[in-house]
Image (spheres, helix red, strand yellow):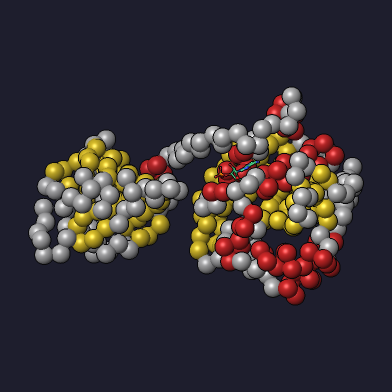
């Protein structure tokens, strides 16, 4: 077992091949960009770093055993331009498992090159290396990468919350996977249409009441509250939060720019003078003046669904409820 491709590995528009010293400038052009490195484990690279990697781990041309990674460049054949690079990591011989990674120049985004290249690498992984399962780990905020994985038929298997202290903050990830039988059935009539619309992601957050919440400091409260972002719409910025008000919290009257809805899960919430218990729902029009706090001394847990970013501003001297 092992993988020794005959290079170049051709796809419709690309040649996948080992990187060489001649790729130095092209690699630095995108691997030095902070935006490219935002959700990947490495920091922006300078020419010296790229040169070192080319001479070391990127020089590998074949996979001989588990724990090894093969890094290939993706070159557009028509223009002989290196537009990105890909990684196939052989995780386990016993479990016949592997992982893919990919980094592309943003100047060449949106044309399906990355999708086409990763598709080519999956052919190597399943057809030549004989893997049973290939995964991709994607930062929760990396929507283009998640779309790419789904476009290739990879299923979302896990949604990890704050699993890594990553570049100065807690980050979560979605893990995608495809099994050899799924790969075969996708290819029952040849390669699938990689331009087909990507199915929408269904966001599922089970056990709301059992969620761990992060301490949040919001200017309208006299102490930190517990908060977790459940979902943010990538285009509109609409936020969904799970919120815990600690007992005795004092809140100032305020307005949110976006309309929003609360569903109380635990305890009691006082909203503009109304007392809401578990299972209660209330809706606030955009910009409406409001006051809400835990009712009495007990704390309370609720879901807040905003139609847009949750921007809040204290109501200042214009009164409260
Ligand atoms: C992740 C990354 C490779 C995705 O790049 P991308 O440009 O979205 O991916 P592609 O090159 O496959 O292009 C896909 C887009 O082109 C469109 N497209 C155009 N022609 C296409 C074709 N022939 N085939 C497939 N898609 C095509 C697709 O519809 C898609 O657009 P959409 O997402 O708006 O629907 C890129 O953002 C990147 O390198 N980021 C930095 C590194 C990184 O985060 N890597 C991932 C770590 S997990």
Residue 9 in sight: yes
Give the quadrant of residue 98.
Answer: top right
Write the residue at 61% across / 61% down: 36
Residue 292 in view: no
Residue at the extreme bottom of the image, as rendered: 48
Give x and y (percent) for residue 164. Answer: 56, 58
> Image quadrant of residue 182?
top right
The structure residue drawn at horizontal position 9% and vertical position 59%, both measured from the top left corner, is 319
- The location of residue 281, given as percent across then percent down, is 24, 37
Look at 42% across and 39% down and name the residue there: 207
Q: Position of residue 278 (x, y in %)?
A: 26, 38
29, above or below 225, in the image: below
Judge from the rendering whether residue 22 lies leftward or rightward of residue 237; answer left or right.
Answer: right
Q: Nearer the viewer, residue 78 or 143?
A: 78
Q: Name the residue at the top extreme.
A: 189
Side (left or right) of 149 relative to 218: right
């Amino acid at each position: 077992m092992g993988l020794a491709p005959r290079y170049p590995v051709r796809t419709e528009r690309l040649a996948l091949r080992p990187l060489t010293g001649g790729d130095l400038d092209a690699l630095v052009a995108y691997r030095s960009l902070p935006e490219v490195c935002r959700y990947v484990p490495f920091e922006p690279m300078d020419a010296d770093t790229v040169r070192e990697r080319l001479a070391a781990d990127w020089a590998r041309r074949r996979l001989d055993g588990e724990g090894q990674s093969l890094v290939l460049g993706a070159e557009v054949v028509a223009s002989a331009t290196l537009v990105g690079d890909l990684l196939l990591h052989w995780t386990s011989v016993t479990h016949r498992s592997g992982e893919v990674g990919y980094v592309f120049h943003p100047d060449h985004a949106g044309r399906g090159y990355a999708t086409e290249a990763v598709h080519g690498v999956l052919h190597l992984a399943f057809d030549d290396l004989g893997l049973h399962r290939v995964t991709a780990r994607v930062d929760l905020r990396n929507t283009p990468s998640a779309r790419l994985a789904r476009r290739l038929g990879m299923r979302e298997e896990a949604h990890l919350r704050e699993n890594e202290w990553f570049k100065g903050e807690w980050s979560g990830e979605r893990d995608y996977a495809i099994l050899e039988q799924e790969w075969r059935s996708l290819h029952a009539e040849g390669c699938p249409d990689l331009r087909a619309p990507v199915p929408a992601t269904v966001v599922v957050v089970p056990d709301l009441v059992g969620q761990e919440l992060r301490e949040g400091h919001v200017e309208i409260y006299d102490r930190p509250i517990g908060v977790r972002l459940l979902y943010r719409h990538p285009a509109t910025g609409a936020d969904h939060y799970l919120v815990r008000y600690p007992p005795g919290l004092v809140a100032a009257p305020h307005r949110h720019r976006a309309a929003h809805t609360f569903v109380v899960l635990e305890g009691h919430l006082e909203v503009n003078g109304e007392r809401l218990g578990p299972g209660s729902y209330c809706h606030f029009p955009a910009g409406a003046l409001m006051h809400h706090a835990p009712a009495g001394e007990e704390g309370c847990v609720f879901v807040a669904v905003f139609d847009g970013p949750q921007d809040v501003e204290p109501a200042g001297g214009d009164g409260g409820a």
